[in-house]
């Protein structure tokens, strides 16, 4: 019998936007979060992999809105699809919930890659 993973917390959202820079600016003003990762058509704000908001440029014709929900779990069972090691310091897998919305389950196991670590101010 397959056991369902024990959810610990929602720890991230991925949002589609036609203007990621503008939306990231608004979110930074509201939340005070710094940029963790900036890449082609993608900006990640947050305190690290434990709590983040990823804003991606949507494709033409795609509606603006939530694209992916990231959920931290206690343990990922081995299944037909093995979990993949990710930059956030976990093993994860993703599944579509609807044609426009996905769910990623992640079990944190190790330190995140450097770009996902919060930049600390030197004193």
Image (tube, rainbow, N blue to C red):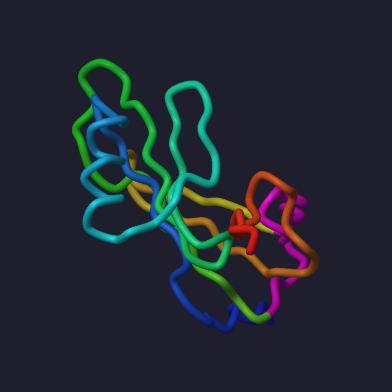
The stretch drawn in magenta includes residue 80: yes
Magenta residues, start to end: 75-91
Quadrant that contains the N terminus: bottom right
Which of the pair 22/67 is nearer the observer?
Answer: 22
Q: Is residue 13 above or below residue 19?
A: below
Which of the pair 62/45 is nearer the observer?
Answer: 45
The stretch drawn in magenta includes residue 64: no
Where residue 37 appears, as percent x and y from the top left, is 54, 40
Q: Is residue 34 left or right of residue 83?
A: left
Residue, x 57% and y 60% (percent of image)?
Answer: 48
Where residue 106 appears, as percent x and y from the top left, is 62, 64
Where residue 57 appears, as percent x and y from the top left, is 35, 26
Q: Is residue 22 above or below residue 104?
A: above
Q: Residue furthest front?
A: 123
Where residue 112 appears, as percent x and y from the top left, is 72, 57
Q: Residue furthest top?
A: 60
Residue, x 24% and y 52% (percent of image)?
Answer: 29
Q: Main secondary structure of the magenta part?
A: loop
Q: Is residue 108 left or right of residue 37?
A: right
Residue, x 33% and y 39% (percent of image)?
Answer: 99
Residue, x 23% and y 32% (percent of image)?
Answer: 22
């Amino acid at each position: 019998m397959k056991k369902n993973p024990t959810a610990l917390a929602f720890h991230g959202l991925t949002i589609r936007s036609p203007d990621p820079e503008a939306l990231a600016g608004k979110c930074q003003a509201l939340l005070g979060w710094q940029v963790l990762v900036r890449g082609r058509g993608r900006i990640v704000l947050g305190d690290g992999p434990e709590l983040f908001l990823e804003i991606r440029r949507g494709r033409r014709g795609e509606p603006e809105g939530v694209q992916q929900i990231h959920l931290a779990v206690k343990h990922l069972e081995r299944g037909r699809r093995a979990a993949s090691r990710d930059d956030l310091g976990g093993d994860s897998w993703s599944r579509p919930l609807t044609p426009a919305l996905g769910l990623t389950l992640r079990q944190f196991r190790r330190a995140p890659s450097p770009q996902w670590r919060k930049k600390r101010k030197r004193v």
